[in-house]
Amino acid sequence: MATAEMEILRERLKCLHLVKSLEVLDEFLQKAVKAKWSYTEFLSRLMEEEYLAKGERSRNAKVKNAKFADMRLLADFDFKAQPAVNEKQIKELAGLSFIDKKENIVFLGQPGVGKTHLATAIGINACHAGYRTLFINAHKLMSKLGGSLYTETLNSTLSELSKYHLIVVDEFGYLPVKEDQANAFFQLIARKYERTSLIMTSNLNFDQWGKVLGNEVLATAFLDRLLHHCHVIQINGESYRLKNRKRKDGDI
């Protein structure tokens, strides 16, 4: 292909944001000549490369927009070190059928047992599968909801949060929730009920959630919706951090 035509082609690919096609163009042209590809085969292979690259960029963007605190993958979770966790069950949940069924997941257990790791790993899987996902600390979520009450933007905030296929609410129960925040949080749960999915992690058993929310009646209504279609995973084990500390102390 003439130099002038190549420059025009590159410019067109750039204008159309076909980034990967532009990147591999010369390589694919060489392969086409050597392997005697037809025009159709060349174009098909080039577009397949672009398609795969766009999918990868989309998945990466979803992970970035989800705002995970850390990148924790399921492959990195040490099931042998935490025998209380049912590996088969977790891997089934990581298959994400619970999102299609509009179900929830709640991880319960003391700090350091892997609740956030597992919740994050499933959330990242959801991003890779194309689901709109948000990871947010419970205290930050309550502050966001409470703040929207004072700015009279609660409805728009609830609508924004309801658009996510999956919201991961981490560390519920570590800090008490104000009355107005609890009411707003209940409205969010009511909107998401049987429409989208939620993953929550907490260091408290359900009978203690009423104290956190400051309202036993509200907590009952909240839990009724949350647990109706829900996988509850209780992790009874020792903290990874404590185990590591003991190992280090033993080495001294």
Image (cartoon, rainbow, N blue to C red):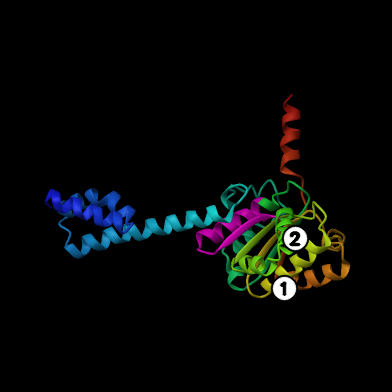
Residue 232 in picture, x, y percent from top left: 73, 64
Q: Quadrant of residue 148?
A: bottom right
Q: Give the residue drawn at x 74%, y 74%.
A: 228
Residue that sits furthest to the bottom in the current view: 194
Q: In the structure shown, which secondary structural element does the residue marked by tag 2 occupy?
A: helix
What separation in Å lies between label 2 and label 1 (alpha carbons)? Answer: 16 Å
* Observer-nearest of 80 and 99: 99
- Identified by mark 2, the residue type is Gly
Report the residue marked by disc 1: 190
Region rendered in magenta: 117-137
Q: In the structure shown, which secondary structural element does the residue marked by tag 1 occupy?
A: helix
Residue that sits furthest to the top in the current view: 252
Membership of 225 in magenta stretch: no
Q: Give the residue drawn at x 21%, y 60%.
A: 42
Q: Give the residue drawn at x 53%, y 59%.
A: 127
Q: Looking at the image, can residue 87 be seen?
A: yes
- Identified by mark 1, the residue type is Ala
Q: Give the residue drawn at x 72%, y 59%.
A: 147
* Observer-nearest of 145 and 215: 145
Label 2 neighbour load within 10 Å: few <14, some 14-19, many 20+: many
Quarter that holds the C terminus:
top right
Q: Looking at the image, can residue 235 be seen?
A: no
Report the residue marked by disc 2: 146
